[in-house]
Image (cartoon, rainbow, N blue to C red):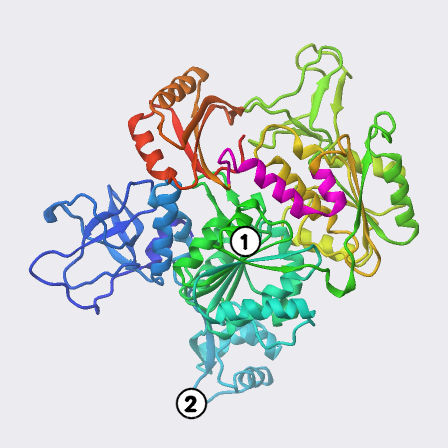
Amino acid sequence: MNREKTIAAAAKISPSLPFAPASAPARVPVLLPYPFAGPFDYAVPPGLTYLPGDIVLAPLNRRQEVGVVWDAHAGPSVAAAKLKPLAARLDAPPMPQALRRFVDWVAAYTLAAPGEVLAMALRVNALSPTVPAAGYEAADPLPAGRLTEGRARVLQALADRIPRTGGELARLAGVSQAVIRAMAQAGFLSPTPVPLAPPFEVPDPRHPRPPLSPAQDAIAGELRDAVSQAAFGVTLLDGVTGSGKTETYLEAVAACLESGRQALILLPEIALSAQFLGRFRRRFGVNPALWHSDLSSRIRRTTWRAVADGTARVIVGARSALFLPFPELGLVVVDEEHETAFKQEDGVVYHARDMAVVRARFSDAPAILVSATPSLETLANVEAGRYRHVKLKDRHGGARLPAVSAIDLRDSPPDRGKFLSPVLIAAVRETLVAGEQAMFFLNRRGYAPLTLCRACGHRLACPNCTAWLVEHRALKKLTCHHCGHTEGFPAQCPLCKAEGMLAPIGPGVERITEEVASLFPEARRLVMASDTMPGPHAASDAARAIEAREIDIIIGTQIVAKGWHFPHLTLVGVVDADLGLAGGDLRAAERTVQLLHQVAGRAGRAEAPGRVFLQSFSPEHPVMQALVANDLDRFYASESASRRPGHWPPYGRLAALIVSAESAAAADLAARDLGLTAPHGDGILVLGPAPAPLAILRGRHRRRLLLKTRRDIAVQPLLRAWLASAQPRRGVRVDVDVDPVSFL
């Protein structure tokens, strides 16, 4: 159904509502899902009343657009005679007040237009009402006529007085659809709509739960108490990998269900839902509702409606699930809260972890942030007393944390042209002989991150970005992982035309897979990367195969680092532990220690002890030392001490302005103009303008300015005044990123 038909199907005017006062035309503000500065006023047709949250059809230019009646606003007043009347109210649940307040807050914090934020919450394709299927019931009284054996079976199938579709009746009675149609024509069956079944089963909080350890049970009790208070508060659930954090916070979900409210669980990667669903089913007997981009439009429509009418009690979703219309949200959980995948970089730029806390506050609900490696931002909030902190210190079921060792590649280098140290190879052989599973981790997709010509030195680069093309040998193509540009692998160098001289430089997971195949030809291998596991179904199949011991060696990117529980996996080898430490990223060390600790946590999660090997050229680096000693607390203390004096996050605030234009000259000029009007003052510093590390992205030249302030200075008023003082020229775009996590 196209957009216009969807709107038409949903539109209706309700004449039964109270009359508006006759003295003056009533007006209401309506927010439209477009980048306008705020709502527009519309006239209310005589005899009707519209309330905040009503989803309406409003004229805009020569079109009719879906919008939401908004709360009072202080925009410029338009003469009543000039107001256009609203066309209709849509047959859809109104947008809850908590969600409307959330939309306004996100817009104000990120400096996005309110309508752009509304667009994430207003799903036009979800607004059309779900039409009951056509079905039949037995006529009463039955007409006179010959009743064959088949017709008698059809009537018997309807003896319980539950209407059924023609297809279901034919299947139950063992007859053809033609028999059903003939019975309807003869008057034996009366057409009737079939009541819609609830789209999601209700999770049972009293379903027999897996046993919890005393530590889990104690923390679960605290989380349950927080939910029962039906008040906002934030708790950090911190626990070592394998300590059973999921099973612990599911008890808070159970308390939320018992209170009659809805729960939202955010996951950073939808692939994680594969094993998570199994844990959820074991606890509650049914699956939760899912929300992510891989769902079909039909399922998204059904889920959106079920959330809005309260029949979907638990939603497990990606960051966009924050904008679903929960009427009675009672709990928000952010699993793996440290993950940068929670930051949305395109469109409205926001961090789902931080916005989840705000969403919970507007719903008077507790929020639980969960991680084995909490972000420094969350730990700073704990330190300041804003968040509670509970911790699971031991692995569940008596399992021990793996032993972590660093392999100094200067002392034990791989063979020429190879990437695996003899020390790691020997450890994998021991693991396979013992009948256990091993994993190689490299956070780099494809075969090689760079291809160059050995004759002239030319490097194959993206034509749209300042980025090298990544070879994907299995697909025989080169890909830019920033803009998606793809081209075939050339037979000769594009510059010097030399043939057979293009060489891959550096490893990706495909190249490691090739090396593993030559070293362990009998081992059954599986590659786990975003391009080999494109969705939750593929992830579920992979998890099943690994748990069933159909796989001996896993080769994976960061998708394998979090959430998985493979009881027979006892060895993890990190191919390039130094990879994330390059460059000048503020959070490089923090991210690397989080990622590698999570990867290490996949080993030894059951009875057999685990081992982890980190291949590194810098085993003396504080990150490697923290991982080997399993002393993250000391690392976090050192990292905090290094950021505090300069007021770097989380002890100060950052906002990035990214200027982009089709030409370098236009980008330079616009960035210079912004720099000349930059704010100044005590505790305020503007860095730049300077070319962004990705100076060209998707064909646009990019320049960056960075606003840094003390923590007690709000950046939004500074940014608004700054942007207002330097209006960008035609063709120039200025994007704002408050609290940036990426500096590309």
Query: Disc 2 marks which residue?
Result: 141
Of 285 and 190, the residue lying toward us: 285
Query: Disc 1 marks which residue?
Result: 295
Three-letter residue code for mark 2: Pro
| Main secondary structure type of the part rendered in magenta | helix
Q: Position of residue 503 (x, y in %)?
A: 76, 21
Name of the residue lying farthest toward the left: 23
Q: Position of residue 251 (x, y in %)?
A: 59, 69
- The local crowd at label 1, few if under 14, some if 14 to 19, many if 20 or more residues have their Cα within 10 Å, is few
Instruction: Tally the marks.
Output: 2
Residue at x 60%, y 79% (from the top left corner): 173
Residues at marks 1 and 2 touching, judged by CB atoms closer than 8 Å: no
Q: What's drawn in magenta, residue-wise? A: 623-649
Q: Quadrant of the C terminus?
A: top right
Q: Is residue 287 visible?
A: no
> Image quadrant of residue 89?
bottom left
Of 616 and 420, the residue lying toward us: 616
Residue 530 versus residue 601 in the image, above or below: above
In the image, is 585 to the left or to the right of 7? right
